Image (cartoon, rainbow, N blue to C red):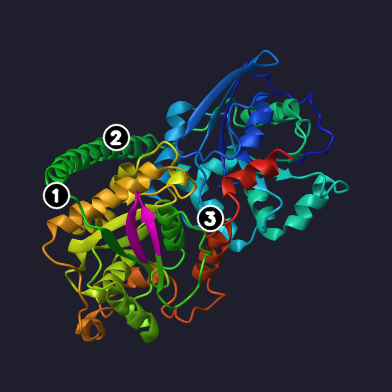
Amino acid sequence: MEAGEDSDYHDNYTALPEIKAIIIGSKAEYKCTAANTILSHTDWKVGKEIVKSEMKQTTIQNRSVTLVMTPGWWRSFTLAESTKYIQMEIVHSLKHCPDPHAFLLVISLHKPFTDMHLKSVVEHMEIFGEQIWNHTIVLLMYDNTEQRNADSKQLIERAGKELDIVIKKCGNRVHVFNYTDSRGINVEKLFHEIERLVAEHQGQCFKIDSKLLEDMEEKRSTMEKQAKERENEVKTKMQSLKKCLTERSCGFPELRIVLMGGRFVGKTSVMNTILKIKQEFSNSKKCVMREGEVDKRKVILIDTPGWWPYASVKETSESVKQEIMSSVTMCPPGPHAVLLVLQSDVAFSEAQSRSVKEHMELLGQNVWKYCIVVFTRGDWRGTSTIEEHIESEGETLQMLINKCGNRYHILNNMQWDDGIQVRELMEKVEMMARGNTDLLTPVEAAMEETDSGWGSNWSDQDKLERGSLKLDPPNMHDDKVKKWLENIEIVSNYRTSSDFSQDILEDESR
């Protein structure tokens, strides 16, 4: 039933004393606004990242109402590109709300909805199984100040055929409402639609395959246990190293650090956070060196050109490879550390692991003894820990972390005033440097080693994950590239431009 149409509320269905629903959708689709409007409370903070499924309950019009908010995925990502942690938490919503009456799929009408977005929605929804569509109502969000003269049918028609496919999969159950006006959603009408949905299923609620839920919950429990063990192990090691550091002579007068990573992972944000500067996001194929102070100690950072996601080293241009190799000579007598920058909100596949290894070893096969993995977008992790991300992603990411001596760190690039996270990172750099007997030095033969062997053993699955075998120069129409460019448009400069969370807050509170 479409919003705006006259509804026959005399259908033969029973009013439910309790309404249970799960809110689902990608990031920044105004899910919190929809939930707050339904509950008539501001229980969910608009702009706050949701990374764990959360439940809220209230009483509305003599009904007990339970809503569960699920974490969002990047709207252009396939299921394989979303972190395993997010997938676990989406399924975990059923532990908060067993046997929900309906799923409320929230989609913004102010963003393009293409075939890429359709695929993303379908894959993430069907984590619960294909039967989920029989229990889903689409909530379409729009701003009435921009489309004040459009009725519901017009808004849906303008959105395109891909959105129409989603609506049809949900049995044409759809509500369109204005997120800038608390009266823009007729809550009573939505409740009637949920009751009608339950009546269509003879009073039966949604049921997930019990084995699927049990397996996912077991994985989640194991992940949480292993994450805590890893966290405790690292804390114990850090305390021991700090004690040794305190007992020995004063540290290095300066720290020289090279930043490595693929394009769009946030290397510029890492530099900005460490040095408290506002270096604009750069697409340069040249190394960029910046100097600053951290706790009155000179710090030299060298940002290297990034490689295209999933690209083998053979597909990276010679000029970029030469720049990466020259980074070591830009801070004589050599860097104390190499910070390998990864995103904390993206899955880490075998193809990415191979790409990282090949490009890192342009600096020599011993580069790993100087390496610390730095995860960006810590602000997107909310209350979850980076250890939970490492453990949930499985062996591929864990092997990389172990290759780096279990040295890793996470930065919240939104919090410049948080000197503690930068101080702790510099402590890790110094502890590692003291443990090494030498500095990272140029490797003359690295290029020959690279060209002779790497990139030749990519499996079909690796190539499938990478999408395109020729990413430099990129095909700007390739879906993989378009996905990364769409997401980078939102977050690549969030540290140097407006706060993305604040943007959402302003959008939803206009």
Number of the front mark, 3 or 1 = 1
The stretch of residues the image draws in magenta is 291-301
Identity of the amino acid at label 1?
Ser
- In three-dimensional space, the C-alpha distance between marks 3 and 1, rounded to whole angstroms, equals 55 Å
Please name whichever residue, 494 or 43, is drawn nearer the observer in this view of the structure.
Answer: 494
Identity of the amino acid at label 2?
Ser
Please name whichever residue, 510 or 61, is drawn nearer the observer in this view of the structure.
Answer: 510
**405 part of magenta stretch:** no
Identity of the amino acid at label 3?
Ser
Is disc 3 in contact with disc 1, using a CB cutoff of under 8 Å? no
Q: Where does residue 180 sit, x and y in percent of width and height?
A: 75, 38
- 485, above or below 296, in the image: below
Where does label 2 land, which residue? 221
The quarter of the displayed image where residue 363 is located: bottom left
The furthest residue to the right: 149
Where does label 1 land, which residue? 249
**292 part of magenta stretch:** yes
